[in-house]
């Protein structure tokens, strides 16, 4: 069972920003920028492009709504999108608030945010998601 499956099952806590029956979005606990969110299908599929078409389309629409909530909440020029897929064998999309292309680099130092700050960011994005 992957860490994401454990998060979906409620075995591991997360800083949830949005959820539907099929999808979940939560803050990355090792963010490259404040507001860095991971978006996943709840069904465990290792590789994004192995996800069935209906789930893939739904995931992209859910991701778009989450990105808009990030954009409304976190000061940034854009919300960058990255799919790497090597670190956890569960399809996931990174949404990262950016000011320039270098902000999406996973070689950048990871931020260490206090739990209070993580909760504050998650609530702000969640509120914007709910309002949209």
Image: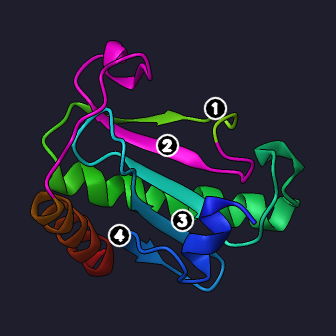
Q: Are the residues tagged 3 and 2 within 8 Å (C-beta)?
A: no
Which numbered tag is attached to residue 128? none
Q: For the residues marked 1 and 3, what is the alpha-carbon distance in whole angstroms?
A: 19 Å
Residue at 88 percent across and 49 percent down: it is: 50
Graded by Cα atoms within 10 Å as few (under 14), some (14 to 19) or many (20 or more), the crowding at tag 2 reads many
Residue indicated by mark 1: 84
Comparing labels 1 and 3, the label whose residue is closer to the camera: 1
First in sequence: mark 3 or mark 4? 4
Residue indicated by mark 4: 17
Graded by Cα atoms within 10 Å as few (under 14), some (14 to 19) or many (20 or more), the crowding at tag 4 reads many
Q: For the residues marked 1 and 4, what is the alpha-carbon distance in whole angstroms?
A: 21 Å
Residue indicated by mark 2: 94
Q: Does dot 2 land on a helix, a strand or a loop?
A: strand
Report the magenta residues as a range: 88-114
Residue 102, image x, y percentages = 34, 13
Q: Are the residues tagged 1 and 3 within 8 Å (C-beta)?
A: no
Residue 75, image x, y percentages = 12, 41
């Amino acid at each position: 069972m992957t860490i994401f499956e454990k998060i979906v099952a409620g075995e591991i806590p997360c800083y949830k920003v949005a959820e539907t029956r099929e999808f979940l979005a939560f803050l990355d606990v090792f963010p490259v920028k404040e507001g860095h969110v991971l978006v996943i299908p709840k069904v465990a599929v290792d590789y994004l492009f192995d996800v069935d078409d209906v789930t893939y389309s739904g995931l992209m629409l859910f991701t778009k709504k989450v990105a808009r909530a990030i954009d409304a909440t976190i000061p940034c020029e854009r919300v960058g999108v990255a799919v790497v897929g090597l670190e956890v064998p569960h399809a996931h999309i990174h949404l990262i608030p950016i000011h320039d292309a270098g902000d999406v680099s996973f070689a950048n130092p990871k931020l260490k945010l206090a739990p209070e700050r993580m909760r504050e960011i998650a609530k702000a994005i969640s509120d914007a998601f709910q309002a949209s």
